Each structure stands twice: as structure tokens, then as C-alpha cells.
Amino acid sequence: MSTAHRPRPNPVDTDIDTDVLVVGGGPVGMLVAAELALQRIRVVVVETRHELDLRPRAGTVHARSLSLLARRGYLPSATCEAIQRDPHGVRRSPFQFAAQPVLMISAPSVEPGPIAGIPQARLEAAFEERAGHLGARILRGHTVTRLEAGDDAVVAEVAAEAGHRSLRIRAHYAVGADGARSLVARIGDFPAQVYPATMNAIAGLAVTAPDGGIPPGWHPTPSGWTLHNPNPHGPARIIAMDFSGALDHRPEPNAREYRQRLEYVLGAPPTLSGISHLTRFSDHGRYRTRLRDGRLLLAGDAAHSHYPLGGQGLNTGMQDAFALGWRLARVITGHERPAVLDEYSRERVAVAAAVVANTVLQSRMMNPREPELRAAMLAMLAIPAIHDAVAQLISGQFQSGFQHDLVVTETDGGVRTLTELLRAGRYVAIRPDEHMPVPHAPAGAITVTGKVTPDQAWTCALVRPDGYLAGTW
């Protein structure tokens, strides 16, 4: 995943007309922009931050996200030879649920893998580089201050960085990827299901000696939990999770409060130095029950926010971007009716509801005052069917209809993987011979003819640009 060259901001005009305005340039916003720019859609990203956010954030990328990233070339995928050699193999990695090492995440060997550790900042940089290279206009150091959505367009007023004039951006659609306090969500009609916070936590980077009083890994105490990812070469990620209750207000954390929170959870003062990149979170959960209001759309934390366990927020947000980008591009180019955006909303709301619910459950299990719940759930996870369902939920593979990678050996002898065919972000139609058309294949679909490996339950298939099956015959 190359991140060597970040695109420079384009020259600033007073008025900008574009197809899509993306509000928020975190990893989800940048990925939405890259997906749109891949389809030659004009897109402008407005992001307040001048630089990448290097605070400790999600670093776990799960199986379904790895597959989607490989399909656009961000990550390596299985080769034709590897798929043909081991078409039915499975790879497994251990993982935690509610801080307990009780899960085994599995993924077919034809996919990149069950889990990978990739820092969120690295993903954001890669998506920004791709979006800029494909022509997206990225305005860092700018903030949307006002947004109006009409029947024909969305108009945004943007406060520019010091020394530049303010901007007015007119777009056909606006995508809110601007976090849990989303301006786009406040402007539109986006009802929400909310789970109030019951705890509070602070994460940060700090240097601590081996005997600094913070055990490595997940550590339970009578007051909560700590998480310590030791780093012998510099600052380590250390989190204090306080289950005494939620905070009435959430000011920016400072080093003094961070030390106090760790001391309270641990029961003794830790030895720390070099504290930096502090961030606060809780187990507050919320998902929007609708992700489209006319020309306004939501993705990522603007659509769903929750207890940050296992990187599920980042993974769900990236999957939002892959599900939205191709649909929005086809609406703008006239190949689909706007109703396809409601399909995006229904599909992703169902996913968000399941993700938020499991994080709420994990928080309750981690509460030191709920040992009976934790014991009951751990006993249930020992049942194979329940374990496998939960593992599929955490890894994102519970979403049905995904077509795993395969090899098409074409009639002329050429071989290509489905991942390679999906690189351009277009529909892929697969058929066994030239005399068998794929029903409902849209204009612009890539059609391949030949034998597939491994064998499938279908004869012909139409695969959506995000890798899910649109139909089989």
C-alpha cells in the first residue's frame, strides 16, 4: 500500500461546481472520493485537518474489508496459481471478544486473510493518494460551515484556511463522512437508535518501563480495564477504561487526567513519560436508521458510532464507502435511478445495527459489576455454532451474498481472478460459453467467458462492483 506522495491541494476558487461534495476527509471520506473518482465523477473533499490524525486509532482490518481493499488494488490478493492450488482451504487467526481470547476468525484461502494490522492513518493516506491521483479535489484546512440541500443541488459554504477567501461549493449530492458529530446528519432528517454511555475511557501514546505498573495486553481490574500494546522502540498505545460511569461532559483529555484515570483503574500510579495523542471515547452507541435524505447521504461514523472494539467502526465505514461509491456514480451518470441509494441505506443500516449491538454487548460483558453476564456469554461462545456466528459478525463476513475470489480460465486460454476483474469498479458478468447471456447485465459490465475455479453453485453470475452477487443463474 503506497503512501509515498500525498497530493497537494488544488488552487482555490471562490465558487466550485462538482458532482459530489464529501464532507470529512478521514479514511471513509477519502475512500468514498477514491471510489467516485475511479468512475470519473467530479468530487471535492473538504477536511478541517491539515494533516493525518496520528492519535491511536483502529489498526485491525478484518476479512471482508481485506477482500474489498484487494479488489481495488490497495492490498495484494491471491494469485491464480494459489487459488487453483488450494481452492477450498481456510486460514484462521485468534481474536478477542469483550477482551477475552475466545474467537477464531477464519477466511477462505482464496481471500487475502482473516485479519491484518494496518494503522488507520496509513489507510487514510493511501485513499487520499488514490483519490488525488484520479482527479478528486482535496481541500484540507477547510471547514463546511453551512449546508443547504434543495431538490436540485446541495450548496455548502466553506471557511478556508487563513489567507484564502471563503468558498461556495455546489454539488448534486453531499456525503457526510464527518464523524459522530456530523454536520450533514444534523442538516438532514436522519433518525437514530441510541444506546447511552455507561463508561468512559482515554487512549494515548506513552513511554513506560517494563515494571511501570501497566501489564501488557488486556488487563481487568475491579474498576475497569487497561490495554497496553508494548513498544520497545518508543511510545506504546495505552488505554484506561473506567467503568464507574459515563461523563456528563467530555472536554479534551490532558496528561494529568490520563494519569489519574490509569491510576484509578489500576489502583496504583503508573510510571509514564512522553504522553501524547490523547483521545477520549465511551461505549455510547448509535446508528442512523436512514442513511439517505434526498441529496444527502451518510457513511462511516456519521452513520454509526460505537464502543471501539476490534476496529469494527473503521471496517464498517470502509465497507460503507465501497457500497456507496459505485451506486452514487451510476446515479450521477444516469445508469441507475436514485432509488438505488435507498438500497444502500437499507443494506448498511442492517449492518450497522448488528455491529452496534455487538459492541454494546461487549461493553456490558467487560463491566466488572456484570460477572454473571460475562460468564454466561463465554459459555455460549464455547458452542461451535454460536462461536462461528459471532466470529462472522466481528469479521464482517456475516453480510450475505459476497462472491469469494475465483479464477476464470477463458476460452482463449487466458486466466484472470475475480479480484483482477473488479479492479475497475464495474459489474462483472461471468458465463460458461458465448451462447449463454448473463441476464440483466448492465451497460459497461465486464463480461468474461470460461470455466471457473473453484466450482460454484451457479452457471452464470453477475457480480456487483463491490464484490456482492447481483444475481446467479
Image (cartoon, grey):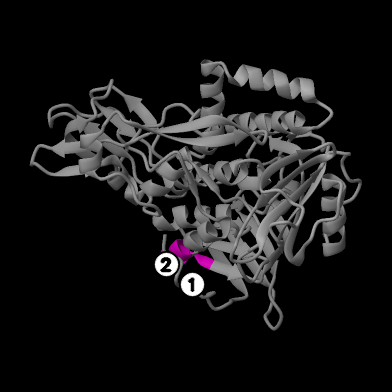
The reply to whether residue 438 is visible in this rendering is: yes
Reply above or below: 310 against 103: below
The region drawn magenta spans 129-137
Instruction: Give the side of residue 264 with respect to residue 324, left or right.
Output: right
Q: CA distance from mark 2 to mark 1?
A: 7 Å
The reply to whether residue 55 is visible in this rendering is: no
Image location of residue 19, percent across then percent down: 51, 57
Numbered tag placed on residue 116 in the rendering? none
Q: Which residue occupies 58% across, 32% down?
A: 351
Image location of residue 169, percent across then percent down: 62, 64
Instruction: Give the side of residue 192 with respect to residue 333, left or right.
Output: right
Among all residues in the image, which is located at the extreme bottom? 163
Image location of residue 237, percent across then percent down: 67, 56
Among all residues in the image, which is located at the extreme right? 248
Secondary structure beneath dot 2 equals helix
Pointer 1: what residue?
7
Q: Is residue 79 magenta?
A: no
Pointer 2: what residue?
133
Q: Amino acid at mark 1?
A: Pro
Among all residues in the image, which is located at the extreme front? 211
139 or 158: which is nearer to us? 139
Q: Is residue 131 magenta?
A: yes
